[in-house]
Image (cartoon, rainbow, N blue to C red):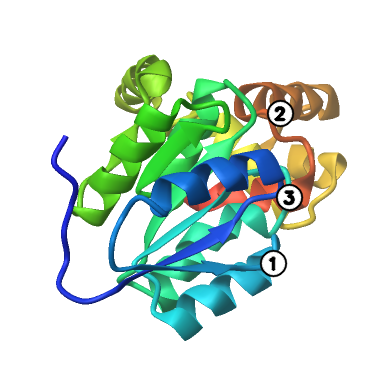
Amino acid sequence: MKHFVSEGDLHVVIAIEHQIITDAVLSLIKTRENIIVHQAPVNSEGILAACIETEADLVITDFEPRADDTICLPTAINENSPKTRILLLSSSHNADLAVVALAVGAHGFLSSQASIHDIQTAFDSLLAGYTYISADFVHGLVSARQLVQKSGNIFGLSSREVEVMRMAVRGFSNKEIAQSLDLSVRTVETHRNKVSRKTKFRDSNQLSNLSHLLVS
């Protein structure tokens, strides 16, 4: 592949928890010209600040959506540093995470066990203005598209499950939800369990961060 070439320096922010992965990414970047690397603290506040301060062209960081602030990070970067392309790495091989990552604003998604070739391809693709997702997760994207076509959201939630979830994240108790929707408390509990199973999230704060992905 012909490497992407840009006029002037490219600024890349790296915030990866595991040093082995960081070293692999750094070794790849060192083979390129006109790239300035900035290593940021591995937390959302530090990563966002680094992207803004350096006017980063690319940020490479971990993705752990069960951390409340992590799921919001891509959106925050897009709003405050719109030129920054976002490549997320995950230790999980769950394709659903790739769907969520792209839905919240990432431009690329890789397994943290990705090969150097995959990292290189993602690096070049994002800097060239494209989206990149490794082949391991393509099936998950196809499945997500089918869920959207069928249910209107990437998790395959029914309209009733969405109603229950939205009330739950607003702080309503199961009893209050049941009264408002004219359901039994047991039925509300069943809907909430299905929401947790389908989204892989159980905590209300985490579900709240995902609520904007639901269009049913």
Mark drawn on residue 139? none
- How would you rate the neighbour count of disc 3 (Cα within 10 Å): few for under 14, some for 14-19, many for 20 or more? few
Dot 1 lies on which element? Answer: loop
Q: Nearer the viewer, residue 140 or 29?
A: 29
The amino acid type, in three-letter code, at marker 1 is Pro
Instruction: Residue type at mark 2: give it.
Output: Ser
Q: Looking at the rendering, in which quadrant would you find the N terminus?
A: top left
Distance from the alpha carbon under mark 3 to that under mark 1:
16 Å
Q: Amino acid at mark 3?
A: Ala
**x and y percentages locating residue 47 in the rendered image:** 59, 68
Mark 3 secondary-structure assignment? loop
Does the rendering let one see residue 30? yes
Q: Position of residue 156 (x, y in %)?
A: 48, 24
**First of labels 1, 2 by sequence position:** 1
Distance from disc 3 to disc 2, alpha carbons, whole Å, reads 16 Å
Q: Nearer the viewer, mark 1 or mark 2?
A: 1
- Could you tell which of marks 3 and 2 lies nearer the N-terminus? 3
Tell me the tag on residue 67.
Answer: 3
Residue 186 point in image, percent of width and height:
83, 22
Reading the image, the residue beneath label 2 is 196
Residue 12 falls in image quadrant: bottom left
Q: Which residue is disc 1 drawn over?
A: 41
Residue at the bottom extreme of this rendering: 53
State the residue at coordinates (72%, 43%): 66
Q: Quadrant of the C terminus?
A: top left
Q: Are marks 3 and 2 in contact (CB under 8 Å)?
A: no
Circle count: 3
Which comes before the other along the chain, label 3 or label 1? Answer: 1
